Image (cartoon, rainbow, N blue to C red):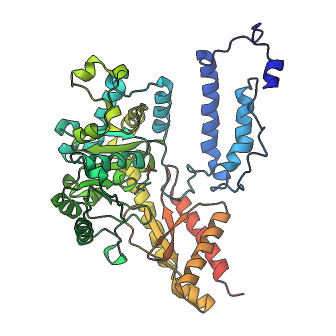
Amino acid sequence: MGSLEAGHDLKNGSTPMLNPLDPEEFRRQGHLIIDFLADYYKNIEKYPVRSQVEPGYLSSRLPDSAPLDPEPIETVMQDVENHIIPGITHWQSPNYFAYFPATACIAGFLGEMVCTGFNVVGFNWVSSPAATELESIVMDWFGKMLQLPTSFLFSGGGGGVLQGTSCEAILPNPFRGAEGSPNRWNQPRKFSAIPTTKDNAFGLIPDSLESAILSDLAVGLIPLFLCATVGTTSSTAVDPVGSLSNVARRYGVWVHIDAAQAGSACICPEFRHFIDGIEGADSFSLNAHKWFFTNLDCCCLWVKDPNALIKALSTNPEFLRNKATESNQVVDYKDWQIGLSRRFRAMKLWLVLRSYGVVNLQNLIRSHVDMAKHFEGLVGMDKRFEVVVPRNFAMVCFRVSPSAVGDRFESCDEKIVNEFNRNLLASVNGTGRVYMTHGVLEGVYMIRFAVGTTLTGYRHVGMAWDVVQDCAHAMLAKS
Ligand SMILES: *Cc1c(COP(=O)(O)O)cnc(C)c1O
């Protein structure tokens, strides 16, 4: 505080007023950042995929407080290179196979730039008509690509909205479920995860749903909401959308289909069957930032009955009143989400759709599935390994088999097998050459190999398998 007063005589105006949005400075610095990122993508394979820093690494490298005086962008970017990049896990690396990759692309990036450049806050139609109307148009385009029933499109009485993440998109739906019965929020509340098993490929069985509903009803609970998943995070398991919806509908339960990652694959006719029966659901969402080449964040949510959302979420303070809203001829997206302010995300989805076209997007997705099949084949050829659950999309869940671990350690106790695979994954990731993560199903620890990032090719998949084999070989070798 003292230093601010001592060093900076604000009254006599000795420091010239800065223009933080000077167009020529924007041009110069913008080009510099694009060059920086182009070089980053070009050289991305030289970094360890998963950051190797220790917690707290950054505080010893950066000053304790913000600078009083401006620093040139070149200096800041030098620090990005020296201090930030070591703490980056390179999600865009072609050797990244962890979680679900976040596919990015030129159009997604540039669309994000245009969105950020306009920096409009499109909460209602009048606050930026293009932001709202483009969003409605691209959501109908995308819905048609997925062959969603017309009841999910604006052209059929439903509609789509862009949100940041799946969690934001899914959260409002239970509120909708509570509409219509003012007493419902006064009831005791309960959330349950209904168990699934390997025998049903970890898909939710309609009979299990019905028993859960019946036992809730028996104790006076009112079931409101079912979230079924197409492509679960741990293993890409698929719930039977149609038959679950049939059960849920009989009890007035709102059905949401969470297809955060795998939903994008349904633009390919050969994968569309995974959402067969979707006409029985109330809402459907996927993350375009996961497998649809649209830079974070971009979650697409379609609903059959937008009025249900609007009734649960709308707000109409005086300062937002306007003629367009009162005409009832416009969409005010603030009423389709929890928050008020919203970004012009449609811009990036529009750029992605137009820059590549449906055919290229389908082929990119197919290429990821083909690479996963290739990896699955490699695992299948090595007797020491096994694929743990059937592959549905572009992820292979595998492990070193109990018999191989048993040969080495004279025990194939599940705990020892799990521990072995946990150590194997740590050893694989410790090389810095690839990054994979794990899942546990029915007590079985498995390594998830999720293909792919936009830059991933067969070469990278083959290399990843070499790393896994080398690490396993070292661990299985009898000393
Ligand atoms: C990734 C994922 C989510 C969470 O997505 P967010 O956008 O981070 O909220 C939810 N469900 C499934 C099946 C996912 O794969």
Q: Which residue is drawn at 62% across and 88% down?
A: 408
Q: Is residue 218 left or right of residue 333?
A: left
Q: Can residue 268 be seen in this view?
A: no
Q: Kindly indicate the quadrant of the structure image that contains residue 160.
A: top left
Residue 456 percent across, percent down from the top left: 52, 54
Q: Kindly indicate the quadrant of the structure image that contains residue 304.
A: top left
Q: Which of 194 and 469 is in front in this view?
A: 194
Q: Quarter of the image for the N terminus: give it.
A: top right
Q: Quarter of the image for the C terminus: give it.
A: bottom right
Q: How many labels does the image show?
A: 0
Residue 162 percent across, percent down from the top left: 37, 39
Q: Is residue 204 above or below residue 100?
A: below
Residue 184 percent across, percent down from the top left: 26, 51
Q: Which of 35 and 280 is in front in this view?
A: 280
Q: In this view, does 464 lie above or below 287?
A: below
Q: Is residue 320 left or right of residue 251?
A: right
Query: Which residue is situated farthest in the bottom direction here?
Result: 410
Residue 211 percent across, percent down from the top left: 24, 71
Q: In this view, does 19 lie above or below 180?
A: above
Q: Is residue 231 left or right of residue 7?
A: left
Q: Kindly indicate the quadrant of the structure image that contains residue 232.
A: bottom left
Q: Is residue 430 visible?
A: yes
Query: Which residue is situated farthest in the top direction here?
Result: 12
Q: Is residue 278 left or right of residue 320?
A: left
Q: Residue at x 78, y 9 (%)?
A: 14
Q: Residue at x 48, y 41 (%)?
A: 295
